[in-house]
Amino acid sequence: MPLPTLTRRSGRRLVLTLSAQTRSTERLVLTLRAQTVPVGYRLTLALRAQTQPDPSRTLTLVLHAQTNRVASGGTGAPVQEPREGLVEILLGAAPFRSRTRLLLDGEPLDGLSWQHTRQAAYAEAEFTVRGVVRPAIDAVMRVEVTQLLPTGQLVVTQYEPVPASGDYTVTTSPDGGHATVFRGRSRQDEQLQNTQLDELIPWVKNPSRQIESPGYRSVTRQIMAVDAVALAAFGDAGQNLSGTEMLQGEYWEETRREYSTEGRSPLDVFGDTYGRLNALLVLENTEQPNWVVVPAGLYEGVRQLDPTLLTGLSEQAEVTGQPSRLTLQVGDLFTRVEDYLEEVVESGTLPDVMGEDGEPVQLEIADPEAALFEVKRDAVLTGYADRDGRRTAHLTRKIGGRVVQTLEVTVGALEVTEQVVADSEETQRRIREARLRHPYFTGMVVHARQRRLENVVLSVIETWYAYLPGSTDSQALAETVTTQTAYTCTYTTITAPATLPAELAALLPGAVMGDLLGQESTRIRNVWSPQGGWLRERLTVESRVGELGQSGLGDPDEPPPPPKAMTVEEYSTAETYAPSGDGYWLYTRTRTGPQKLPVRDLDTDEFVKTERRVGVLEHNSEITENAPPTLREEVPPVAAQAGGTPEGETDPESYSGLPWPRITYLRDPQEVSLPLGGPAPAQTAQLEVVQELDRASSLAAVLARSLRPRVTRRVSTPEAQALRPALLLPGLGIVTLVTARGQGQSHTLEVETVTYDD
């Protein structure tokens, strides 16, 4: 390589011409020191260049140079002289010039050096300036870099401002000069760390009433969404949070997926949820309290560095940290006993279960049919009993886990008799003989015709149950209606096939219906107190047949028709409960209805007729310790209690005597395991709030992405850009750390990125 030719020019500008040919990639570093008398200059030149092997091309080096004038002899304090703002000399390329301003509360400083670092959760800066500067606490530190790019474009870059901490250090040189060093840092993350939260989970301080009851069968559990807890926690610290979609739909649940925030910080809440998935919490900018959750391996926005301006690039691969297997343990699976035992009852395989007191419970199935009806949510139970020549068939229907209908039909045989006057010759002869023996005989001879009817429906008793709208409690009855219908037959009745539910028709083959004898009903209306859920009022209305009427009784030639209900009497019973204090209740019962009273003729002093009047038949009240029935969940307003019957989740009373009155659910652990094939030991993570295995599998894949082999790159460039972590630099990776620094008017940007191996 030939020696370089150095041409000296007046002033502080130097021109260095270096020509060489190379057959391989070369890195050249040239250090040049020059000195003059009586005033000297010390000049340090760092030359770096790279080219592809090409003997026919000339390698041109671009020189970045800055001079510092020193006292005679080359030592001593710098001479205070007017400094040029643009001191970089570019040879062989368009000028790339930088000018840096350091500001404190908008006032420019005489900067010597500076550094600005941007982490995911905060930014910090350090200034070294001439003179004595005493920054106030929270004074705003800013760095502003103006650059003239090789393209001729003028770009102004402002790095994120940070508040000064108030600490500073002043040094004094031997010649009496002063320099001050002070630092600043954004504080949003400190607010998240230092804020102590109150309890944000409502049931931790006020658990549901039924949870405390020792004998409950089913419960209404309160829930709170995971993202709602995180947003509330950040809100208590005066911060905003976005990007919480990765756990959207998951929730904390009373007695199942418990959580508490009291005394903890918002960062703890983040760490217990999104942090378990190695998600990154990024401060969007230092001037606003806005945070964003970025899943591992993803990014928020794309930026670009000019590849022709890069002055340094290093690359480091990490493959030994990948575990051989990743296991994500999620929330336990809670299965209602009723849902699970349906399979158990059908298969006859009894599981080993634990009661809520931690003791083992031995399950026994004495009546499989009744047990299956109990554990199924939608089911019909039928059966019959034969007594005294009659068969009574019953049906019980469940919808949504609650009884909505019961039906009882009784059938039997009827023998009907019809009397007819005898008019045959034999009958007349017998009448004449009777009159000869008994001269005073005035009667007649009648014959009795008989008819036997089989499988006649004698009575139908049906009850419908309606529940409070929105309720899941099997006790939350809004209304019960029971209808009792009686049938009869005469000798001339023409029967018809009985109309019965299909489930009962098979138990009562050939059932027929005759003439309607009468119909009675009982309607019960319950009113529940919205304050406490106790039974406030129960109104029972009974409709009973008062009188029967039948025509044609005096006509011996025609059989009379069946009797009909002539009057219907209604009886009402009102029961009320009211808390009177100290655990006592005022219970009142009033029964009203019709009465038939005899009417006396005051003139003859004889009873001549009866009159019907309606009045109070019975009334009593008492103070009692017997509390009314109480519901285990929120009760709607009284005006809304007469609605329909939604699907519920509670259970009727046991038909089969199954010994599980206190078991409401079974608890099984859940986990997802992914083979990663790495050399490191297997790793286990926990995220109790997730409840579905499908969701757990997708989240495990997100977590696995952060554990895969990665490539970390560190690049440097004189180009100024206000970057932050979670931005993507194409070809380089996702930004994890940004450091900008300068000395005098120089500027260097160092960026650390990461790329995951998919």
Image (tube, rainbow, N blue to C red):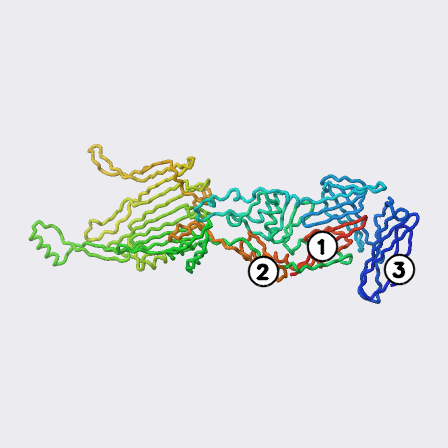
Q: Decide which of 481, 122 is in the foreground and name it.
A: 122
Q: Amino acid at mark 2?
A: Leu
- Which of the 4 image quadrants contains residue 349? bottom left
Helix, strand or loop at mark 2: strand
User: Residues at badges 2 and 3 in contact (C-beta under 8 Å)?
Assistant: no
Q: Residue 752 — which label?
A: 1
Q: Decide which of 527, 145 is in the foreground and name it.
A: 145
Q: Quadrant of the N terminus?
A: bottom right
Q: Which residue is mark 2?
A: 674
Mark 1 is surrounded, within 10 Å at the Cα level, by few (under 14), some (14 to 19) or many (20 or more) other residues, namely many
Q: Residue 248 — which label?
A: none
Q: Amino acid at mark 1?
A: Glu
Mark 3 is surrounded, within 10 Å at the Cα level, by few (under 14), some (14 to 19) or many (20 or more) other residues, namely few
Q: Relative to 80, is 630 on the left or the right?
A: left
Helix, strand or loop at mark 3: loop
Q: Relative to 260, is 100 on the left or the right?
A: right
Q: Which residue is mark 3?
A: 4
- Across and down, in percent, residue 275 comes to 61, 51
Residue positioned most to the top: 603
- Across and down, in percent, residue 297 comes to 65, 56
